[in-house]
C-alpha cells in the first residue's frame, strides 16, 4: 500500500508539450516549452511509431532547447511531440535491490522480477554531505590483496584511484577487490564496459555470495553517452542510500575515464569548446561533483570508493588521470613493465600512495613497511646496473641486502586472482620475510 501511495504522489498534476523543430546527429532541438526547461530537465519524445524516447536537456540555442537522447532516435522527426517528464530525476531504491543487476535507469536487466520502489527519493545528481558535517575516515579496511593491505593501506570512507593502461590487469584487480573486501554492501558500477565481460564478472569474479550483498549497475560501451554518464550517477546514488542506512558501503566504479568520455561527448554536442585533449570544461567540473559524493557520511555510515582510471598510452599525467589524482585520497599505480615480467597484480608500490598512511598504522607496522619500501627503492635505483652485471656484490651492503630481499618481496606481492590474505596475515608474512635480515647479515 505504501508503494502505491508513493507512486500516486509522484503523478504530475499538469502536462506540457512542445514540438521537435530540428535534428542534427544526436542533437534534437525543440520549441514551445523551452521556457519551462532547464539544464538537466527530462523530456520524452513521442516517435511516429508510437514509441517513447527519453532525452535530457543539455543546452539552449536560438530560443530552442537542445536535447540528447538516452536511446536511438529511430521514428523521431520534425513535428513529433515533446513532453516534459519529471523535473528532478530521482531513484527509489530499497533493501530488495541487493543481489540485482540494473541499467542506468534503475531497471532490472538480470531477468528477475520487477524491482519494488522505496519511499525515499534519492536524486541521481545528489550533493555530497557538507564538509563541516562529515565524519573522519574510519579504521583500516581489509582489501584482501597483500600489496594493498601493507604498502597502500586503505581506511573506511577513503577514496582511492586505480590507474592503469589497457591490458595491465586493472579489471582483474577490480574483481579481487569486489570479492575480497570486507564491507556490508557493495555497489558496483560498470561504466562503458564490454558487453561480453558483464556476465563473466558477475558469475566468475563476483560469484553468488558476492552478488547477494551487491547491487550492480551496468551501462555497456554501445549505449548512449547519457546512459553511461547516468550509470555513474546511479552508482553513487545507490551507495548514498545504503550509507544513510548506516551501512559500510564499498563503491567500485570501472571506470571514471569512460564517465569523463561520456561527459565530453555530451559537452561537444551541446557546443562546448574542446580544451585539453578534446575534453570540455564541464568534464573537469563534473569529476569532483561525482567523486566527492563518496567518503564518510554525517552519521555512522560511510562509502569507501575505489575508482579505476584508464590512462591512455600509459601516460599517468594525461588530463583525466591528473584531475582524478588531485581529487581522491590516494592512488594505486599499475605498470605494464611489471605485468610483462609476470607479477600480478602489477602494482608499483613505490609510485602508489595512501593519504591515510602512516597515521592508520601502529609504530611497528610503519617500521616494517618502511624497511620493505627501502629495499624495493634501493633495488629499483640499481636495477639497470644489476641486470647488466655492472654491479659487483660486496660493493654496497645496502644494495646487497636489496638484491637478497627483492625476490622475496616480489613473491609476497604476487597473488592469485582467487587468493585472499587478511590484514593480520599480510603483516605476519611480511615480518617473516624481513626476519631473514639477521640470517643474511650473519652469513
Image (tube, rainbow, N blue to C red):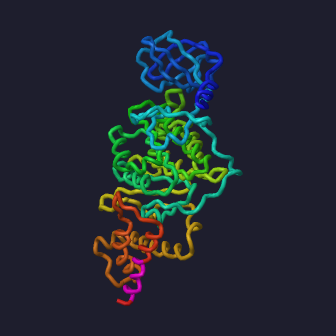
In the foreground, 410 or 304: 304
Residue 360, x across and y down, in percent = 57, 66
Q: Is residue 340 left or right of residue 316?
A: left
In the foreground, 3 or 352: 3
> Is residue 145 shown above or below 328?
below
Residue 335, x across and y down, in percent = 38, 57
Asked whether residue 93 is in view, the answer is yes
Residue 241: which quarter of the image?
top right
Q: Is residue 258 left or right of residue 288?
A: left
Which secondary structure class fits the magenta region best?
A: helix
Residue 83, x across and y down, in percent = 56, 16
The quadrant the N terminus occupies is: top right
Residue 341: which quarter of the image?
bottom left
The quadrant the C terminus occupies is: bottom left
Q: Is residue 371 magenta?
A: no
> Is residue 99 shown above or below 339?
above
Looking at the rendering, the stretch of residues picked out in magenta corresponds to 432-441
Residue 12, x across and y down, in percent = 63, 20
> Is residue 313 shown above or below 391?
above
Residue most extreme to the right? 132
Residue most extreme to the left? 389
Residue at x-position 49% and y-position 49%: 186
Residue most extreme to the top? 79
Asked whether residue 337 is in view, the answer is no
Amino acid at each position: 500500500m505504501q508503494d502505491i501511495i508513493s507512486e500516486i504522489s509522484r503523478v504530475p498534476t499538469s502536462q506540457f508539450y512542445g514540438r521537435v523543430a530540428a535534428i542534427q546527429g544526436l542533437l534534437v532541438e525543440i520549441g514551445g516549452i523551452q521556457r519551462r526547461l532547464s539544464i538537466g530537465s527530462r523530456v520524452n519524445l513521442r516517435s511516429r511509431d508510437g514509441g517513447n524516447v527519453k532525452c535530457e536537456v543539455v543546452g539552449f540555442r536560438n530560443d530552442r532547447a537542445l536535447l540528447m537522447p538516452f536511446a536511438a532516435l529511430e521514428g523521431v522527426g520534425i513535428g513529433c511531440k515533446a513532453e516534459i517528464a519529471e523535473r528532478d530525476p530521482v531513484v527509489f531504491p530499497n533493501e530488495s535491490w541487493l543481489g540485482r543487476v540494473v541499467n542506468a535507469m534503475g531497471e532490472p536487466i538480470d531477468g528477475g522480477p520487477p524491482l519494488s520502489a522505496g519511499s525515499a527519493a534519492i536524486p541521481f545528481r545528489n550533493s555530497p554531505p557538507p564538509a563541516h558535517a562529515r565524519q573522519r575516515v574510519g579504521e583500516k579496511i581489509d582489501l584482501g590483496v597483500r600489496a594493498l593491505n601493507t604498502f597502500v593501506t586503505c581506511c573506511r570512507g577513503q577514496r582511492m584511484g586505480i590507474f592503469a593502461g589497457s591490458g595491465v590487469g586493472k579489471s582483474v584487480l577490480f574483481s579481487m577487490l569486489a570479492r575480497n573486501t570486507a564491507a556490508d554492501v557493495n555497489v558496483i558500477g560498470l561504466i562503458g564496459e564490454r558487453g561480453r565481460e558483464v556476465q563473466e564478472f558477475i558469475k566468475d569474479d563476483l560469484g553468488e555470495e558476492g552478488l547477494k550483498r551487491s547491487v550492480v549497475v551496468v551501462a555497456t560501451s554501445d549505449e548512449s553517452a547519457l546512459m553511461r554518464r547516468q550509470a555513474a550517477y546511479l552508482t553513487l546514488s545507490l551507495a548514498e542510500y545504503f550509507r544513510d542506512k548506516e551501512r559500510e558501503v564499498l563503491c567500485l566504479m570501472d571506470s571514471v575515464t569512460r564517465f569523463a568520455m561520456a561527459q565530453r561527448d555530451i559537452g561537444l554536442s551541446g557546443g562546448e569548446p574542446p580544451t585539453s585533449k578534446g575534453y570540455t570544461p564541464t568534464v573537469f567540473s563534473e569529476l569532483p561533483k561525482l567523486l566527492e559524493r563518496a567518503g564518510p557520511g554525517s552519521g555512522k555510515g560511510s562509502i569507501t570508493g575505489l575508482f579505476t582510471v584508464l590512462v591512455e598510452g600509459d601516460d599517468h599525467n594525461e588530463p583525466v588521470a591528473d584531475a582524478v589524482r588531485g581529487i581522491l585520497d590516494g592512488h594505486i599505480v599499475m605498470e605494464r613493465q611489471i605485468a610483462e615480467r609476470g607479477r600480478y597484480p602489477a602494482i608499483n608500490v613505490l609510485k602508489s600512495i595512501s593519504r591515510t598512511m602512516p597515521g592508520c598504522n601502529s609504530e611497528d607496522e610503519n617500521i616494517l613497511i618502511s624497511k620493505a619500501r627501502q629495499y624495493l627503492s634501493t633495488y629499483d635505483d640499481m636495477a639497470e646496473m644489476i641486470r647488466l652485471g655492472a654491479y659487483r656484490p660486496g660493493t654496497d651492503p645496502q644494495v646487497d641486502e636489496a638484491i637478497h630481499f627483492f625476490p622475496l618481496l616480489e613473491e609476497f606481492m604476487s597473488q592469485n586472482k582467487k587468493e585472499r590474505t587478511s590484514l593480520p596475515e599480510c603483516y605476519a608474512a611480511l615480518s617473516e620475510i624481513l626476519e631473514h635480515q639477521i640470517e643474511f647479515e650473519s652469513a
